[in-house]
Structures are given as C-alpha cells and as structure tokens.
Image (spheres, rainbow, N blue to C red):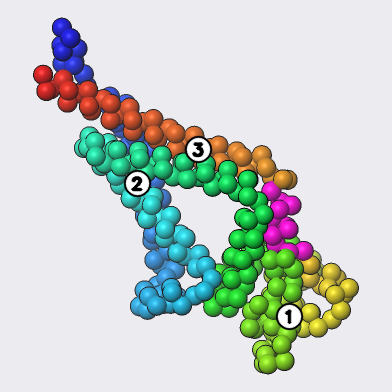
Amino acid sequence: MHYYRYSNAEVSCWYKYLLFSYNIVFWLAGVAFLAAGLWAWSEKGVLSDLTKVTGLHGLDPVVLVLVVGIVMFTLGFAGCVGALRENICLLKFFCGAIVFIFLLELAVAVLAFLFQDWVRDRVKEFFENNIKSYRDDIDLQNLIDSLQKINHCCGAQGPDDWDLNIYFNCSSESKSREKCGVPFSCCIPDPAQKVVNTQCGYDVRKKSKSQWDDQIFIKGCILALEAWLPRNIYIVAGVFIAISLLQIFGIFLARTLISDIEAVKAGNAF
C-alpha cells in the first residue's frame, strides 16, 4: 500500500500549460528584442563590421537590448520545451536561472542602498564615459538626449561635463563649430518654436555662468535622477514588486511541475 499511492500520480495539465503560456510570452518577447537589436545593428553597419562594437567607448544601447533578448529567448525556450516535453533538466535550468536572477536583483538593490556613495561615483563615471562617446553612436546620442530632455538636466553634474567631449570642448585646439557649447537637449525649450533648434546650445558656455540658466538646464543629470527617485518611489517599488511576483510565480510553477514529474517517475519505477 505504501507504493500504491504513486500509481495514480499524474502530471497536472493545469500547471503544465500554465507554465507553457507563461514562457511563450517571454520567448516571443525575446524574439522581438533580438529582431529589434539585430535590425538596429544592421542599420548601423555593425553586422558587417563587428569591430565597431569594441570601438565604442560608451554604452551601445543595442547591446543591452540584445543581452535582454538572449536571456528572455533562452529562458522562454527552456521553459516552453521543458513544460511540453516534461523535461526535468530544462525545467531545473529554467527554475535555477530565475532564482539566480531574482537573488541578483535583490542583492543589487540592497548593495545600492547600503553603498550609495560608491553607486553615485560609478554612475557619474559611467555617464562621463558616455558623454565622451556622444557623437560616436546615434543610439547612444538619442539615449542621452532623451535623458536630458525628460529630466531637464545637462551633463553628469552640470553643463561643464561636456568639456569631456572633443566636439564640445572649450580648448583652443578644438576646431568644432560646437566648441564650448552643449547638445540641443540641454536647452530650455521655447513653447513658441514648433521646430527643434538643434543649434541652440552653440557657444553657450562662452557666456558667464550667470546667463546660462536663461538658455540651458544647469542641473546635472545625477542630481536630477536623485531628486526623481524619492518623488516616484512608489512607482519604482511597485515595478520591482510586480517583477518579483512574476518571477516567484514562474519558480512556483516550475517547481510544482518538477515535483509532479518526479512523482510519476517514482510511481512508474514501482
């Protein structure tokens, strides 16, 4: 009688197809991210010359899109096939990867809270490196412009950070027309202008600093982001909790399905 209870064990179709549906969404999203990333690289000519990836000193946003796409595609594929084929190895891989990502997110959040000064220095260093490469990649340029326009900021700590870029540098050696200026995304928008003036930042830093705030944003983007976070802490917390619950739900489905499969195999063994 002790072994007979396994003879009626079966894999729950509810958990099986729920896990499959859960993963097919991630798999399709991964395909979309990969397609978008590869298309962006093809438009920039990176696929024909991969050395362009290593030649960029700043962040290429497309790389981030591709990494996210690869992770989502791999996990979605493992989860889908593992659920349909009742493959314990693939299900354990999926479950372990989700647990690792969840713990990694938790660790990053805790360390960021405990070592705020160190994180601030790393963010400043990261932003400054990308300022140097502002004109080297169109996607990076658009990302920085969007960040500055949305947050009404300029540079990492202020407009003078644009001295790090060879095109905006104020040194006498610079022959650029943008010398001693800032990108147009630093400019305070004029509601009367229907067309964006991309030359609004030219020569602005040749003026005295007391005149800057009439024409450009003078707050650095790091300070702007630090001010943005407390104002939107509930939104940030809500997004983090939602992502965590999705991950925990995926772990629960995978572990439940693994237990069902193992119970069926144990019953068949007898």
Residue 74 x, y percent position in the rendering: 33, 50
Residue 14 x, y percent position in the rendering: 32, 26
Question: What residue appears at the point 84 percent right and 69 percent down from the top-left corner?
Answer: 213
> Most extreme residue toward the left, as rendered?
270
Residue 65 x, y percent position in the rendering: 46, 59
**Crowding at mark 1 (Cα within 10 Å: few <14, some 14-19, many 20+):** many
Q: Is residue 78 above or below residue 55?
A: above
Helix, strand or loop under label 2: helix
Q: Is residue 251 above or below residue 214?
A: above
**Crowding at mark 2 (Cα within 10 Å: few <14, some 14-19, many 20+):** many
Instruction: Calculate the distance from the C-alpha at mark 3 to the C-alpha at mark 1.
Output: 44 Å
Residue 155 in the figure: left or right of residue 44: right
- The span shown in magenta is 219-229
Mark found first going from the N terminus, 3 or 1: 1
Contact? badges 3 and 1 (CB < 8 Å): no
Q: Is residue 151 above or below residue 7?
A: below
Instruction: Calculate the distance from the C-alpha at mark 3 to the C-alpha at mark 2.
Output: 16 Å
Mark found first going from the N terminus, 3 or 2: 2
User: What is the quadrant of residue 176 in the picture?
Assistant: bottom right
The residue at which mark 2 appears reads as 75
Residue 166 in the figure: left or right of residue 192: left
The residue at which mark 1 appears reads as 181
Q: Is residue 147 above or below residue 194?
A: above
Residue 70 in the figure: left or right of residue 232: left
Which disc, if any, is residue 31?
Answer: none
The residue at which mark 3 appears reads as 244
Q: Is residue 58 magenta?
A: no
Amino acid bearing label 1: Gly
Contact? badges 1 and 2 (CB < 8 Å): no
Helix, strand or loop under label 1: loop
